Amino acid sequence: MTIGVLALQGAFEAHVKALDSLGIAAKLVRTPPELADLDGLVMPGGESTTMLKFLEKNGFFDVLQSFVRHTPTFGTCAGCILLAKDVKNPTQKSLAALDITVERNAYGRQIDSTILTAPTNLPGNPLEMVFIRAPRITRTGPGVEVLANRDGFPVLVHEGHLLAATFHPELGADLRVHQLFLDIVQAHRPS
Ligand code: GLN
């Protein structure tokens, strides 16, 4: 299974380590051709506006948009913002692949970043979730499955081949969310 991690900006190294712990040697993706032959892609947290600036070069945005339409992709925080159909606070361009609305920086400023433990629909214990200037998911479409909530708002969502978290599973020791993504990738591989 070949997994890429979008490495334009942000917390991509932590995703590479998490995947390594699950036996996957992930490839860093910095140019459109590097998306070829991937079975799945992780889009990390960071700053979605900065990532968009990089994506505007070399037609990367359009290539990535057709990629995420069909290939399993996992977006965390800024990566979740990029995947969302609608982005608010302020309105922002996105890949518009995942049927959710997100509000950027909805939990406050950097100082309000926090670590919570909450129940999830994942097998096993409650999940520790690291929030850093996180977006809030304010709407989910009918095809979107909510796997965890914070204060009644979804924080981990799944729709078909797409998975998104408004927190940073790559910064904790719990590998269940990455394992879930690998299971989604496995399920979508051509037999
Ligand atoms: N606030 C950032 C944004 O709007 C996301 C923060 C994060 O990825 N930790 O892109």
Image (cartoon, rainbow, N blue to C red):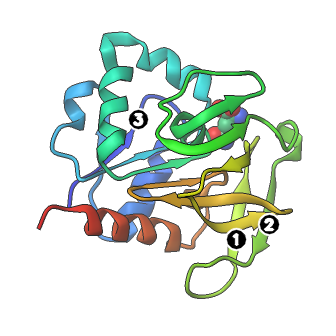
Residue occupying the point 46% across, 39% down: 97
| 2 or 1: tag closer to the N-terminus | 2
Q: Are marks 2 and 1 in contact (CB under 8 Å)?
A: yes
Residue occupying the point 56% across, 73% down: 174
Rounded to the nearest angstrom, the CA distance separating label 2 from label 1 is: 6 Å
Q: Is residue 30 visible?
A: no
Q: Position of residue 191 (x, y in %)?
A: 11, 68
| 3 or 1: tag closer to the N-terminus | 3
Horizontal placement of 35 versus 99: left or right? left
Q: Position of residue 106 (x, y in %)?
A: 82, 40
Rounded to the nearest angstrom, the CA distance separating label 3 from label 1 is: 25 Å
Q: Residues within 10 Å of mark 1 (few under 14, many from 20)?
A: some
Q: Toward the viewer: 25 or 189?
A: 189
Residue most extreme to the front: 142
Amino acid under label 3?
Ala
Task: Tell me the residue that label 2 is attached to.
Answer: 116
> Vertically, is 23 above or below 52?
below
Q: Toward the viewer: 151 or 124?
A: 151
Rounded to the nearest angstrom, the CA distance separating label 3 from label 2 is: 27 Å
Image quadrant for the N terminus? bottom left
Amino acid under label 1?
Glu
